[in-house]
Amino acid sequence: MKNEIVLKELSTAELKEKLDAERALYQKMLMSHAVSPLENPNKIKESRKNIARCLTELRAREIADKK
């Protein structure tokens, strides 16, 4: 719930930057996990959900702009 509030307060450019950073972190964690197991593999799932949250907010703004 707290994460949604933070995303809504960001500008679109900041949100895109956060999305890019989160995607890079996700890819890095996947590669690290393939070589040697991560200490907390749930962070991969959390990162994937954060990416989805960013994409959802971007799409909601795109729809709102069209109206």
Image (cartoon, grey):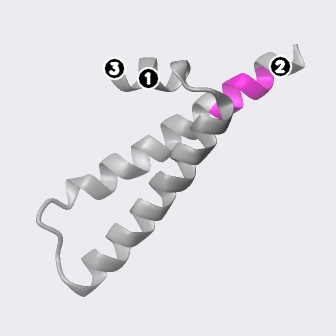
Q: Do the residues labelled 3 and 1 touch (CB within 8 Å)?
A: yes
Image location of residue 16, percent across then percent down: 62, 43
Residue 53 forms part of the magenta stretch = no
Image location of residue 54, percent across then percent down: 54, 37
Q: Is residue 1 visible?
A: no
Q: Is mark 1 on a helix, strand or loop?
A: helix
Identify the residue position indicated by label 1 in the image: 6
Q: How crowded is mark 1: few (under 14 residues within 10 Å), some or many (20 or more)?
A: few
Image location of residue 5, percent across then percent down: 44, 17
Pair 3/1: label in front: 1
- Of all residues, the one furthest to the left in this rendering is 39
- N-terminal-most mark, 1 or 2: 1
Please state which amino acid type lies under the numbered disc 3: Lys
- Of all residues, the one furthest to the bottom in this rendering is 35
- For the point 71% across and 24% down, the residue is 61
Q: Residues within 10 Å of mark 3 (few under 14, many from 20)?
A: few
The tag on residue 64 is none
Pair 1/2: label in front: 1
| Distance in Å between CA atoms under marks 1 and 2 | 20 Å
- For the point 38% across and 26% down, the residue is 3
Q: Is mark 3 on a helix, strand or loop?
A: helix
Please state which amino acid type lies under the numbered disc 1: Val
Query: What stretch of residues is rendered in magenta?
Result: 58-63
The tag on residue 2 is 3
